[in-house]
Image (cartoon, rainbow, N blue to C red):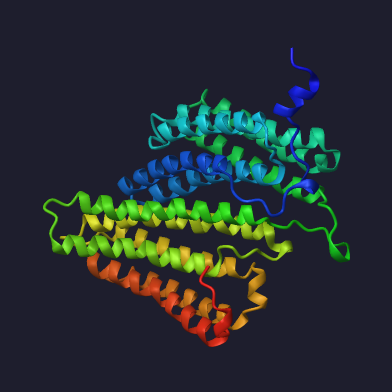
Amino acid sequence: MPGPSTFRRIWQPPGRYADRALERRVTFLEVFFDLVFVVVISRLGHHLATHATWAGVGWFVFLFYAVWSSWLNGTLYYDLHTTNDVSVRIFTFAQMLAVAVMAVFIGDVPGDGTDGFALAYAANTLILVVLWFRTGLHDPSHRPGSVPYSTGYLVSTVLFLVSVAFEGPVVYWLWAIALASQVAGWVIGMHRWTPPETQQGEAIITTTPSLIERMGLFVIIVLGEVIVGAVNGMADLHPLDAHGIVVGILGVVVAIGLWWIYFDLISHRPPVPRRTQLWLNLHFPLVVAIAAGGAAVLNTIEHESGSLPDAVRWLLVGSLAAALLSVALITWTLQIRSDQPEIYRAVDVVLVVCAALCLGVGLTGWAAKGTLGAMVVLLLAPVAVGVVAWLKHTEPDAIDLE
């Protein structure tokens, strides 16, 4: 039998928050973990593409939050408390298996996939309960936060499990209460837990480069859905002519514009420490809007030869307007804003104006090509203004495109 020291080498307690590596990079295990969420989001986006209604959007946002909560909590645990041992791999792979089952059923919620999704989600949430409870069990200084935090997720686990015994709307009300209990646990935990003190005695939470990078990778995942929507939209056109290709390319450029805006203004830029929680939560409306935009691009291209239904047009312009506004809000949390105020002030004005103009396009009767073309212009306008402001207010020897 292996001795205690050998066991401890392969099954270590969670890392202490105070001892976390501030300069570590994203690992291949984390990237592998993210891959399973690609499938979940793809299935969810496909469901929205076939249900482009107000109800469909509501279900999309509701279920996307459940998925986002699973991803974010797994990501935060890995960033704050990870260790280099077997236990991390086992817990990560267990989460991946649960999320894979979630992906199987999420496309049929509400409907036949309800019970399957509830059980898979409960299994994944229970793993998170174990992970976060262990942080307080092994680190008394973290216990005031981990106990309410893990308790909120335990309540959520129980409610999702109990929901399989019911039918009809009561099931989804239980899910809503379960997700609300997660939020309550988060808020109470963060209120009760005091992070290690920093300069001037102010207790704050700082982000690590790896967490910022993980957030960027998740944005890449949802941007991929926009490209998938454009490509699948073109592939579904029969026959595919030059007009269809142009409309499809416009859909790809939508993804390019969103990428350029986010990765020029936000990526690799830490938030002000006291705004870390706001920075994290403002990413939710951004990623849900981009993912919805992918479904909208697919639907828009599929109607390239005829009139564009109002529901499809509003899904497209509404999701992209929400994405632009989310980017504008996130920039207010960044440290770099105080160093480059001229650039960010100029871009923020354009982001808000372009978001309003996106909604204005929704009032038109434009077809697919005109609507997508307008979206491309309105997404590239902040890029152009940002480049001009950057060149104007940046010294030539300080220019860096990374």
Q: Is 164 situated left or right of 375 in this image?
A: right
Instruction: From the top left corner, tell me how far across and down residue 21 is, in percent.
Output: 72, 49
Q: Is any atom of residue 162 visible in this view?
A: yes
Quarter where residue 66 is shown: top right
Question: Could you say which is closer to the camera, residue 73 or residue 32?
Answer: 32
Instruction: From the top left corner, tell me how far across and down residue 51 is, in percent.
Output: 33, 46
Circle count: 0
Quarter where residue 133 is shown: top right
Q: Residue, x 55% and y 63% (percent of image)?
A: 267
- Report the residue that reaches farthest toward the right: 201
- Quadrant of the snapshot with the N terminus: top right
Q: Is residue 20 above or below residue 386?
A: above
Question: Could you say which is closer to the camera, residue 307 or residue 44?
Answer: 44
Instruction: From the top left corner, tell me how far across and down residue 73 is, in percent.
Output: 62, 43
Q: Is residue 186 above or below residue 297?
A: above
- Report the residue that reaches farthest toward the top: 1
Q: Is residue 281 above or below residue 384?
A: above
Q: Residue, x 36% and y 47% (percent of image)?
A: 48
Q: Residue, x 65% and y 40% (percent of image)?
A: 181
Q: Is any atom of residue 155 visible in this view?
A: no
Question: Could you say which is closer to the camera, residue 184 or residue 211?
Answer: 211
Instruction: From the top left corner, tell me how far across and down residue 296 is, in percent.
Output: 33, 56
- Report the residue that reaches farthest toward the bottom: 392
Q: Residue, x 13% and y 50% (percent of image)?
A: 238
Q: Is 142 situated left or right of 56 in this image?
A: right
Q: Is 236 situated left or right of 166 in this image?
A: left
Q: Is residue 393 above or below residue 267?
A: below
